[in-house]
Image (cartoon, rainbow, N blue to C red):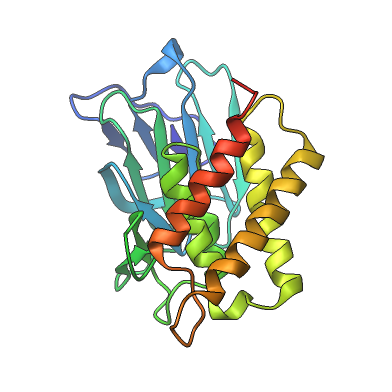
Amino acid sequence: MVGSVSWPELSWGDGPADADGRHVVVKTRGQAGHTRVSFWSGSMPVLGALVFDGDLALEDYRIFVGDMERLGRWTQRISRTGPQRVIIRVDDPGYASRVDVGLDITADAQVMPLPETGPVLFDVLTSDRDGIHPANQRGLALDGHDAPHRRLAAAIRLLSDRSVIETRQNGYEAGIIGEWLRWLSMDLDRAGAATLGEQLQQLVIAARTTNPADDRSVLPADAARIAESILDAVFQDRE
């Protein structure tokens, strides 16, 4: 259940989601496994199926997530209070394991590919008319560990954007990718992730020097090769 902080008096309908103007009850896989709920502001991934797009009356600058058995709940602060547009997408309508909740999505929001050029990881619905900031694009690409090679290759291409060519910024972004890698292995510690981040940074720098384009970006084929090399290092001797 997603919505206002009070518990709803909703019964299950036949569809994958039901709403009462203040809450949306989303059918998930229940106690058969974990369900992940992600909140997005201004931009959200266009993944799975749309199960709700409408106004909810949200109180006290908060949005609430809980289960209908009332075993647990979680609350997050939001930027506005009162009626506002809420978008909910799920991976499997009626048996969802992943729920994406979009806030602050305007009526004139546009769909953009991520990344904006080359092979697309997925589309993004965004209210940003000037395009999504590169840091936010990288965050979207790394929000999950399904399809790790595709996500990592996309993040590498976004890392190579002109705005992050400076060495210090490159090191910072490579470090973020290194931390993301830690979720792929039980044995990868902070020091190991930092080492992989440094290796990735050096591979990206080398790939830039072979690209004749003026923007010194990493070509998709090179990004895929670098991603494969880093993932091989993550799983080496850890399987």
Image check: 11 left or right of 79? left
Q: Seen from this angle, which residue lies furthest front?
A: 210
Q: Seen from this angle, which residue lies furthest right?
A: 191
Question: Is 73 situated above or below 137?
Answer: above
Q: Quadrant of residue 190?
A: top right
From the viewer's side, name the closer residue of 114 and 197: 197
Residue 173 horizontal/vertical position (percent) = 66, 62
Residue drawn at (37%, 19%) of the image: 29
- Quarter holding the C terminus? top right
Question: Is 191 situated above or below 44?
Answer: above
Residue 214 horizontal/vertical position (percent) = 47, 88
Residue drawn at (26%, 25%) of the image: 94
Residue 58 visible in this rendered orientation of the protein: no
Residue 13 horizontal/vertical position (percent) = 22, 25
Residue 118 visible in this rendered orientation of the protein: yes
Question: Is 62 situated above or below 72?
Answer: below
Residue 198 horizontal/vertical position (percent) = 72, 55
Q: Quadrant of residue 167?
A: bottom right
Image check: 124 left or right of 170? left
Image check: 44 left or right of 94? right
Residue drawn at (46%, 49%) of the image: 151
From the viewer's side, name the closer residue of 234 and 152: 234
Residue drawn at (81%, 41%) of the image: 191
